[in-house]
Image (cartoon, helix red, strand yellow):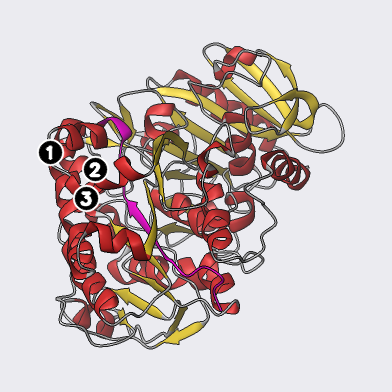
Amino acid sequence: MPTSSRKLCLIVVDSLRTDMLLRAVADDLAPNFAALLERGALIGDCVSAFPSVTPVACSEIATGVGPDRHGISGMNWYHRAEQRYIEYGSSLEATRAFGLFRTLYDTVYNMNMAHLSHDVETVFERLADAGVRTAVTPFLIFRGRRRHQLSLEGLMRRVAVAAKFRHAVWGPDELFYGELYASRRVPCKPTLARPGTRDTYSACVGRELVREDLYDFLLFSLPDNDHHTHTYGVDAMVDSISHADRSFGEIVDEAGGIEAFLDAHAVILMADHAQTDVETAVPLAKALGEEWQVLAANAEHPESAELAVSPTARAAGVYLLAEDGRRAATHAGVRGRLRSLTGVDLVAWLSADNGPGDEAVVESARGELRFRPGSQLSDRRGASWDAEGELGALAMEPRDDGLDDLVYPDGLMRLWSALTAPNAGDLLVSLEQGYECVDWGGATHIGGASHGALLAGDSLGPLVLCGLEPGVEEAREQWALRDIAALVLGHFGVTTDADIRAPEAQAATEAEVAR
């Protein structure tokens, strides 16, 4: 049973930026979020995953570990064992290119039941084992201990029937995933298939959860801000923040108002990543296809391809498929071609050239840096690294209290985790400000905004802590998504490997895992 008498509500507003949150509050467009800021502590620079896209970020929030351990590497990645791309719905056009049924199956079922590593546990699994009642509104990562049958309601019924999609999933006690899964009947219109209407569905479900007292921990997901900002750009975000605030206000009202809600709940308000405006497309697959045979979407003969290219918004992975004597030359050639492309900011890969064991190499216009876990340099989270070459490649400078990493926050650990992930590309790419990769459907968000890069603009979001242990916001110099699971578990007295009161101990653990 939970040791805390207060419930915990974790609100994840997809793509929320700190500056736009503060603007919405200042303009009196987000009174409920304003109440959290007034009563809690704002950490304005919580670091996302890399790539800073929703599947990777949600996995990190739910498990407390990076892609090296949870196994999700992007919006699109190449499955080496199955010799095919995994596509989680980069765009409607990309979904069509890979097939609606295949994308549905990968996004809804495989992401949780197959792609997310079973060597790590989610907060829903850990809390269930401790007797804590858990609930979630539509959130990409929901794996838990309770079995849920397919609901088959609304617009997705015909799609699921045609796809012969019949699979049950394991989730929290109360799982609501639009038309597909619902742990109980609620008077809420499923809207999973229509972006821009999901916050309203979350709000309706949330009212029922509050009214019936069905949870101790609620992950309250508000995804519409992401779609709105992709479409209209960063300056339009205040409108979707206001919409998210009203949706949160629905459960606040059901609880009897903000004071009553906060008497009963501790609250964490956060983003999974941020967004920045984009103006220029980078046709990565097309460019590499001029020199190598690039695996196409749903290719009939994948064995003939030399490369697989996985655009994931403002980042990408490139996979070398040929296992022959030309591999080293292909690797060098692809690196050279990537460096020549306008809009490419960083290229990173793993290398064992300098002796036993892997080291990461990152190359930018500012030079080349090689690094690996070690003892030479400490970062702001307390992890230690050995490095050779130009720290300026990641715009870093040493300082007394750790590396200055303002341009690429937590850059060493995020790159290392991404590169050593089981599904990582042989080469990882991060784009410059204003650029976005063309996805496999030929689509971009040009004229709107996007995310995915290692840069701070894509990677830093707000973290508001309200009603948790006093002074908890001071436990770390630099907060990251992988700290959230420990906060949630700690609230209910569930022991974790990453004690939030000992950040240097967690950093040592992270570095040891990295080794």
Amino acid tagged 1: Asp
Location of residue 486 (image quadrant)? bottom right
Q: Secondary structure at mark 1?
A: loop
Which residue is label 1 attached to? 28
* Residue at 23% across, 57% down: 258
Q: Residue tagged by mark 2?
A: 34
Residue 77 vs residue 331, the one in the foreground:
77
Q: Position of residue 110 (x, y in %)?
A: 47, 70
Give the Cα separation between the discs numbered 3 and 2.
5 Å
| Image-quadrant location for residue 392 | top right
**Where does the magenta region start and end?**
1-19
Q: Residue at x 27, y 49 (%)?
A: 441
How packed mark 1 is, by other alpha carbons closer than 10 Å (few <14, some 14-19, many 20 or more), is few
State left or right for residue 401 relative to residue 170. Answer: right
Residue 123: in sight, yes or no?
yes
Q: Quadrant of the C terminus?
A: top right
Q: Which residue is mark 3?
A: 32
Left or right, residue 39 beside residue 247:
right
Nearer-the-camera pick, 131 or 100: 131
Label 1 to label 2, Cα distance in Å?
Answer: 8 Å
Task: Give the mark nearest the N terminus, 1 or 2.
Answer: 1
